[in-house]
Image (cartoon, rainbow, N blue to C red):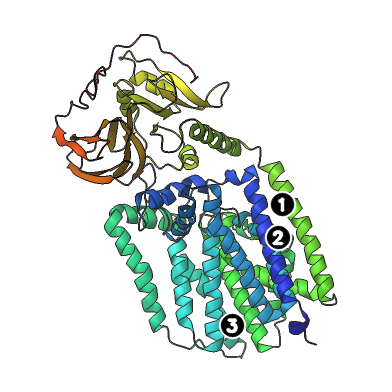
Amino acid sequence: MTESRSFPNLIACALLALVAVSLFAIRLALPSVLDDRGFYLHGAWVLDAVQNGHWIGQRNHVGDVTSKPPLYIWLAALATLPFGRISPFTMLLPGAIATLAIAATIWRFGSASFGKRAGLLGALAYLLSYVGASQIALARPDGVFAFTVTAAALAAFRAWTSGQGWTWFWLAAAAATLVKGPLGLLLAGVGLLAAGWEKWSGRSAPITGSHRLGVVLFLLITGGWFVWAYLELGPALIDRMIFRELLRHAIADSDGSGPGHWFFIQPVNFLWSLAPWSPFACVGFWRAWARPASNQDERRAERFLFCWFVAGLLLFSLAPHQQERHLFPIMPAAALLAGRELARWASTMSPRALLGTCATVAIAGLSVMAVSYHLFLDGSERVLRAQGMQALARSIRERVGDGFPLTHVDTPFALQFFLSSTAPLATVEQAARLLSGPDAAFIAVRDLDSLRGALAQKAVPLFVVAQWPATGEANLRIVSNHARFEWTTDMSAVFNPIVMRTHGVRFVSKRGQEFVLRVTGPAGVVVFANESRELQVVRARIIDRASETLHERLLAPGDQWRLGVSRTAAKSRVDHREPRRSILPTPSRGTTLTPIGVARPRTDVLVRGMAA
């Protein structure tokens, strides 16, 4: 009975899936997962897609254009939509699925090219290494990029050896390009240098087949997205994505190496990243060069993997911008050859004994990974800060629920990430104007002294209603001119470039320039002010128990729009522009509202207090 018939494929696949799921669960449960800055670099762009509908091109909370093409952003956004809230799980899910898919691809390709044992051991080596452990819990495009490059590379191998099927290669290369740019096409194609190697060794294997349809589809997909994104974002897209990211990282980087400067960094990163299996990969590369397989199909496979890895490693070693995760797209090639060498060592083991050994190694490897991440990262300063923002966000939701109109001044995006918010940052001067106005305003701020300085000429009592840490010197505070952290009848907040003031209307959510508000009293008023130098289209969606209406207004720079609504019909009562300093009408007997910039009489004492 041959190995392909006797080897328990289903059990092997279940083992790989169980290892991948366990690895993901372990990494997700450890606080060290918050050490990745990708949550806060890419989370804002994901929220911009989900909350503001900017699916083609995204900006973050400070207005920066996305630094990479959007495929990872799309996948993380699609994972976020069913839950209604961004979280570490939704940000990590695309990379986790991609890691499992790579392991499955290694299993399948390795089994077809080198045997079932090699496929299983190569996939297991990939998962039980730094590559698998970090990639599966990385809130960045690298995991998705590694999978799309792997899919494109192996599609190229199939097309080369069969003489057809190049359309699949170009489609996979288009997906890789939509993750991290044209480098994906290059990495997926360098393995085809093996065709020249075969010819040089006297065994000609030319690259045949038509590329016409594939090239057309590649250009339509990648070029179509880029043109559409440019129409939305303008020159900022080229400046950020082409000049600041692609060219700067390819030519110069202050933290990199480049030729003659620490050229060995990436080879050392490889040895560490795939440890303890990297020595087996090195033996596999040596064997492919010095003692190629006699079987034609196996020889072409090993040479393709050799060219894919070595050419990619050379490229990353020459690049001035170097990090371990940059090697992820070429690691499957190393894992496949490591699996073949491991299979040679385990050739005398029965399939049952081999699976039992693999399960034991998996348990030991997962345990070592869990302990290592816990010991070395869980208590790091960056993890503790992220946990602090997570705890503060949880406290805010418990006290005032979702959608509370906080104005963020200089807060780290980590707080907004855990609040599932993407509000643009306000200036200290804007925050000071809100606090000195008649409405309750709640400001999240780190540099409280700057805010106090902006309020120096105004007699405004200032209450600290929440902070982190809860005791001792605060790193971040939520301050207000209202003594308690709660919803009030009159509230104001900055959603740059729009300032919103409400009376008898509660803010629900914001999507782009559309504000969703709910009527809470018999009558309400909401005022929008445009504080930018450009025209702004503002929409207000007013919802009530039985109706919903949408209002829209084009606001000139410095203009204001007052919208009055009634609860009975939830429709507009007042819908007109007013002079700049007229903000809210007197909404009900006994309540007096004052114009912007004119503060109610305040005490001269700056009060710091916590909410009851």
Q: Secondary structure at mark 1?
A: helix
Decide: few, some or many residues near mark 3? Use Cα within 10 Å; few <14, some 14-19, many ≥20.
some
Q: Position of residue 475 (x, y in %)?
A: 52, 27
Decide: few, some or many residues near mark 1? Use Cα within 10 Å; few <14, some 14-19, many ≥20.
some
* Amino acid of disc 2: Leu
Which circle marks residue 316 in the picture? none
Furthest toward the top, the residue is 604
- The residue beneath circle 2 is 128
Residue at figure coordinates x 71%, y 74% from the top left:
10
Residue closest to the eye, 558 or 159: 558
Q: Earlier in the sequence, mark 1 or mark 3?
A: 3
Residue at figure coordinates x 46%, y 16% from the top left:
608
Please identify the quarter of the rendering in which residue 588 is found.
top left
Q: Earlier in the sequence, mark 1 or mark 2?
A: 2
Q: Earlier in the sequence, mark 3 or mark 2?
A: 2
Residue at figure coordinates x 42%, y 50% from the top left:
45
Q: CA distance from mark 1 to mark 3?
A: 39 Å
Q: Choose mark 3 or mark 2, whichever is in front.
A: 2
Please identify the quarter of the rendering in which residue 6 is found.
bottom right
- The residue beneath circle 1 is 369
